[in-house]
Image (cartoon, rainbow, N blue to C red):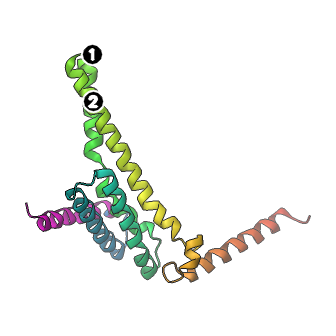
Amino acid sequence: MNLALLLLENGVCAAVATVGFAALSRPTKQIVIVAAILAALGRMCRTGLMQAHVAIAPATLVAAMLIALCSMPAARRYRIPAEMFAFPALLPMVPGMFAYQAILKTLQFMEVGNTPQGHTLLGDIVYNGLATFFILCALAIGSTVPLLIFHPESALGRLLPRFCSRRQAVQVQTAGSQGKEQLDDAAGPR
């Protein structure tokens, strides 16, 4: 199959799945559209890396980081937290088939027991279970690290005011100082 056609197919399928997942929480149209575009972009990135013989976990890590980084300008534009765009876009990359195979092979192993077929099943259980674990870790790390690094209150966020909205940083500081004053008032006189 042609690589461009494969990437396009994966991107469209990821976008459709994201629209379905996002519809469960009844978001606005902007969130659904941006999340679908991010999902297509991330899935195409992961598929392209896997076609270049990169393992699925590192490819997922790069794709999740790309989704998180691309969600930040959209968050600034629509004044919505970046997580609202990034998390629905990550859902199509959750390793459902690996998890399903691990559970299925575990149930088959329980029926077969300690036989040569059981040893083969045990290898499949370990492979699918570890693949599920590492892909989920890649999704978690890849999606949160960029959001934490480029948050307006982080050290890097203070250095990059155009990437991280300064107004948002000022709002966070103001809200934090108001919360402290309210706590001091509630504590009473000292």
Q: Is residue 72 visible?
A: yes
Please say if 168 is above or below 43.
below
Q: Nearer the viewer, residue 69 or 17?
A: 69
- Give the residues drawn in magenta, as a range: 1-22
Residue 183: percent from the left, percent from the top?
Answer: 77, 65
**Quadrant in the rendering for residue 154:** bottom right
Give the structural element (helix, strand or loop) at label 2. helix
Q: Is residue 23 left or right of residue 5?
A: right
Residue bearing the label numbered 1:
114
Kind of residue sitting beneath label 2? Gly
Residues packed near mark 2 inside 10 Å, few (<14), some (14 to 19) or many (20 plus): few
Indicate which disc residue 12 carries: none
Q: Residue lying farthest right?
A: 190
The structure residue drawn at horizontal position 62% and vertical position 74%, both measured from the top left corner, is 172
The structure residue drawn at horizontal position 32% and vertical position 33%, both measured from the top left corner, is 126
Indicate which disc residue 123 carries: 2
Residue 145 is one of the magenta-drawn residues: no
For the N terminus, which image quadrant? bottom left
Q: Nearer the viewer, residue 56 or 70?
A: 56
The alpha-carbon separation of the residues under discs 1 and 2 comes to 13 Å
Residues packed near mark 1 inside 10 Å, few (<14), some (14 to 19) or many (20 plus): few
The structure residue drawn at horizontal position 25% and vertical position 30%, both measured from the top left corner, is 105
Which of the two labelled residues, at mark 1 and mark 2, occupies the earlier sequence position? 1
Residue 3 is one of the magenta-drawn residues: yes
Q: Is residue 146 left or right of residue 31?
A: right
Kind of residue sitting beneath label 1? Asn
Residue 41: percent from the left, percent from the top?
Answer: 28, 68
**Quadrant in the rendering for residue 34:** bottom left
